[in-house]
Image (tube, rainbow, N blue to C red):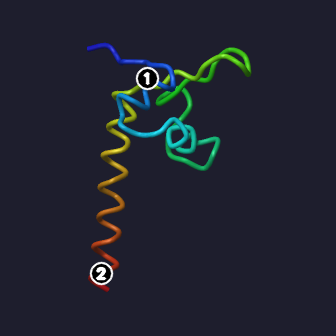
């Protein structure tokens, strides 16, 4: 199945998050989404960013598992 690449407004809608949240999750902003794997910047500073919705959804699930595990460990301490 081919990856689904969408522009920012459509990707945010598909992922049920805000456009700003997506942008904050980029590695260039201290986040965990990697350029070339999760998103591709446009060819110019005004070109739209496209997002790989399937890979980002998987990254959100993985990240959520990590956070839940850390919370459980902190509670056990």
Residue 31 sits above or below residue 49 on the image: below
Residue 73 sits above or below residue 44 on the image: below
Crowdedness near tag 1: few (<14), some (14–19) or many (≥20) residues, C-alpha within 10 Å: some
Which numbered circle lies on residue 40? none
Q: Earlier in the sequence, mark 1 or mark 2?
A: 1
Residue reaching furthest to the right? 45
Disc 1 on helix, strand or loop? helix
Residue 49 sits above or below residue 29 on the image: above
Position of the C terminus, as image quadrant, is bottom left
Give the total of numbered labels.
2
Residue 74 sits above or below residue 67 on the image: below
At 51% from the left and 26% from the top, the residue drawn is 8
Q: Nearer the viewer, mark 1 or mark 2?
A: 1
At 32% from the left and 13% from the top, the residue drawn is 2
Crowdedness near tag 2: few (<14), some (14–19) or many (≥20) residues, C-alpha within 10 Å: few
Q: Are marks 1 and 2 in contact (CB under 8 Å)?
A: no
On the image, which quarter does residue 5 sit in?
Answer: top left
At 38% from the left and 27% from the top, the residue drawn is 53
Disc 2 on helix, strand or loop? helix
- Residue 73 picture location, percent across and down: 30, 75
Position of the N terminus, as image quadrant, is top left
- Residue 7 picture location, percent across and down: 50, 20
At 30% from the left and 63% from the top, the residue drawn is 68
Q: CA distance from mark 1 to mark 2?
A: 38 Å
Which numbered circle lies on residue 75? 2
- Residue 26 picture location, percent across and down: 56, 40
Which numbered circle lies on residue 10? 1
Asked if residue 69 lies left or right of residue 49, the reply is: left
């Amino acid at each position: 199945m081919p990856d689904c690449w969408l522009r920012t407004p459509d990707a945010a809608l598909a992922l049920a998050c805000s456009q700003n949240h997506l942008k904050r999750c980029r590695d260039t902003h201290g986040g965990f989404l990697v350029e070339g794997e999760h998103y591709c910047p446009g060819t110019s500073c005004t070109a739209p960013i496209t997002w790989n919705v399937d890979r980002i959804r998987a990254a959100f699930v993985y990240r959520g598992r990590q956070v839940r595990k850390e919370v459980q460990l902190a509670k056990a301490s």
